[in-house]
């Protein structure tokens, strides 16, 4: 790809902006005062008020860089896009200010202290003129909203182009197209724009062994409430068996689930005074893996492997990698105002990458989940995932759902709802109540995933105190997952036999394909 986009394709049509028709006004009778006013070019005059900082924003058009030539490189394109967003912000403030000033004028016309000076006919005439100006101002607001949407779409498209270019540059051997000769390397802008993003993404064949880089993360493996004193939780992580338990000090530990003596599974035993006791000969291991008791024989210096283990925000996390653990652990708390209502753990017979693909895809909901949460959903003509912040975080259009991926295997989503199974509005901001979800897809093995699911609500706190409510939440979660599993298991079978599960990515595949590329980068696959 020789260029990213033309200047016309990237920049917001700034030249189409209208200047305000409002003239400067110092004040009005009867104590009412306009606290901020527009000039002829839509700029702000210097008038002190409590609202001043909100509207006192410089017009960015004068600082917009002028690039010569037909095409822009990546840095130029990003600079233009940045000024697009700055302009949209400035324009929105001017639109709001216009409406506020017009409302002030309405107040002035209706001011009872001014009625002695105006006839009813004059007031009607002035109000009719103000109504026309208000209608025009509201139309301008809708134009600004359209500009914001266009700017965000262009940013998303640029991101796709950059990712596509990155993938081609780092993985030319997997390209479906032959390398162009020097005489045919130049592409037209239309051919660049119409090129399918992620076309070269190939995920097929048996699941490969995990790259060591993928292990160098903090992985949530259990909920704190499930790990009680005197109990153990066996887990598999990257095809190795481990066991979780609490030591004498109450802190969690993670040691290999294999006795050093005769390789007996330790989870078949018990916890004795903060140590795991092997059920075969009674050898006991502390949270650091050291054997501290050997009944019936002399104590030897024996130690089994342990993992760095930490407890934070109601979750147990381990570090399975060979690098030193990161000093900062990922925060997976729900947003402020939410209360946790359910924490569920499931072992699923599917590779964790395919499960992540499914969780990061919302377009399948009205076709797959017709018996659960998407029952009755209409099928929109176009589904998109927009990323105003980064390629791993954004929101779905037209669904009121925000979504974020946090490496290496966490998906967070906030859903705007009116009641279970119903959608309200087209963005989470338009919704009065919300459901927040955390999905952790721990790679147990190449064909098995340990799923940790946490559900939080910003309404109905009384549900936390309803007896057996957690059984209802689990039943509903299992219903939703079963609708997905029958499809994902079929994908897995065909993938192992050589089918590519990422053929022909389209617009709503953006988030999932970005994550696939991210995981490939982490694993050294690009």
Image (cartoon, rainbow, N blue to C red):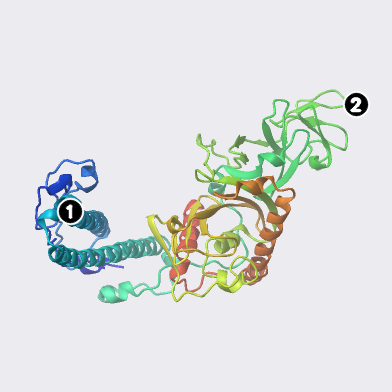
Residue 216 falls left or right of residue 47 = right
Q: Position of residue 245 (x, y in %)?
A: 73, 36
* Secondary structure beneath label 2: loop
Callout count:
2
Q: Position of residue 190 (x, y in %)?
A: 28, 76
Q: Position of residue 419 (x, y in %)?
A: 57, 60
* Image: 111 above or below 504: above
* Secondary structure beneath label 1: helix
> The C terminus appears in which quarter of the rendering?
bottom left
Q: Residue furthest front?
A: 116
Q: CA distance from mark 1 to mark 2?
A: 97 Å
Among the 4 quarters of the image, the one containing residue 204: bottom right
Give neighbour class at mark 2: few <14, some 14-19, many 20+ (Cα, 10 Å).
few
> The N terminus appears in which quarter of the rendering?
bottom left
Q: Position of residue 116 (x, y in %)?
A: 12, 54
User: Looking at the image, is mark 1 or mark 2 earlier in the sequence?
Assistant: 1
Residue 386 falls left or right of residue 19 = right
Residue found at x 53% / y 38%: 329
* Image: 228 above or below 353: above
Q: Residue furthest top?
A: 298
Camera-nearest residue between 12 and 9: 12
Q: Which mark is residue 290?
A: none
Give neighbour class at mark 1: few <14, some 14-19, many 20+ (Cα, 10 Å).
many
Camera-nearest residue between 138 and 298: 138
Camera-nearest residue between 23 and 350: 23
Residue found at x 71% / y 59%: 475
Please give the residue where the numbered disc 2 appears in the rendered image. 296
CB atoms of marks 1 and 2 within 8 Å: no
Please give the residue where the numbered disc 1 appears in the rendered image. 108
């Amino acid at each position: 790809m020789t260029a990213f986009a033309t200047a016309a394709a990237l920049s917001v049509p700034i030249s189409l902006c209208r200047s305000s028709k409002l003239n400067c006004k110092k004040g009005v009778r009867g104590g009412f005062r306009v606290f901020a006013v527009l000039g002829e070019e839509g700029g702000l005059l210097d008038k002190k008020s409590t609202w001043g900082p909100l509207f006192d924003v410089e017009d960015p058009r004068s600082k917009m860089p002028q690039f010569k030539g037909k095409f822009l490189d990546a840095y130029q394109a990003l600079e233009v896009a940045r000024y697009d967003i700055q302009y949209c912000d400035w324009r929105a403030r001017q639109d709001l200010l216009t409406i506020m000033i017009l409302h002030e004028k309405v107040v002035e016309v209706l001011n009872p202290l001014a009625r002695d000076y105006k006839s009813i006919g004059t007031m009607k005439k002035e109000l009719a003129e103000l109504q026309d100006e208000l209608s025009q101002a509201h139309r301008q607001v809708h134009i600004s909203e359209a500009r914001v949407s266009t700017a965000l779409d262009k940013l998303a498209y640029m991101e796709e182009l950059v990712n596509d270019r990155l993938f081609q540059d780092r993985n030319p051997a997997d390209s479906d197209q032959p390398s162009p000769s020097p005489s045919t390397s130049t592409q037209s802008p239309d051919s660049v724009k119409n090129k399918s993003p992620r076309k070269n993404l190939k995920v097929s064949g048996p699941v490969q062994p995990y790259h060591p880089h993928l292990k160098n993360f903090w992985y949530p493996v259990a909920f704190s409430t499930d790990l009680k004193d005197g109990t153990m939780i066996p887990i598999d992580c990257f095809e190795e068996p481990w066991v979780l338990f609490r030591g004498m000090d109450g802190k969690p530990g993670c040691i290999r689930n294999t006795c050093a003596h005769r390789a007996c599974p330790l989870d078949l035993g018990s916890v004795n005074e903060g140590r795991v006791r092997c059920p075969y000969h009674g050898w006991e291991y502390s949270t650091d893996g050291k054997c501290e008791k050997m009944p019936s024989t002399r104590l030897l210096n024996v130690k089994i492997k342990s993992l760095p283990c930490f407890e934070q925000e109601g979750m147990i996390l381990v570090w399975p990698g060979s690098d030193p653990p990161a000093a900062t652990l990922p925060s997976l708390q729900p947003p402020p105002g939410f209360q946790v209502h359910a924490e569920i753990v499931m072992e699923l017979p599917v590779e964790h990458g395919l499960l992540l693909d499914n969780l990061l895809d919302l377009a399948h909901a009205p076709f797959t989940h017709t018996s659960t949460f998407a029952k009755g959903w209409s099928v929109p003509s176009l589904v998109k995932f927009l990323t105003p912040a980064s390629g791993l975080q954004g929101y779905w259009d037209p669904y009121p759902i925000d979504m974020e991926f946090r490496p290496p295997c966490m998906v967070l989503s906030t859903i705007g709802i009116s009641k279970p199974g119903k959608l309200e509005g087209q963005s989470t901001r338009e919704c009065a109540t919300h459901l927040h979800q955390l999905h952790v897809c721990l790679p147990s093995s190449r064909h098995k995933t340990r799923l940790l699911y946490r559900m939080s609500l910003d309404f109905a706190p009384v549900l936390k105190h309803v007896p057996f409510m957690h059984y209802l939440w689990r039943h509903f979660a299992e219903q939703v997952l079963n609708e997905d599993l029958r499809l994902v298991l079929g994908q897995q079978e065909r993938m192992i036999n050589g089918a590519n599960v990422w053929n022909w990515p389209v617009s709503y595949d953006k988030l999932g394909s970005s994550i696939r590329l991210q995981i490939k980068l982490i694993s050294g696959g690009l």
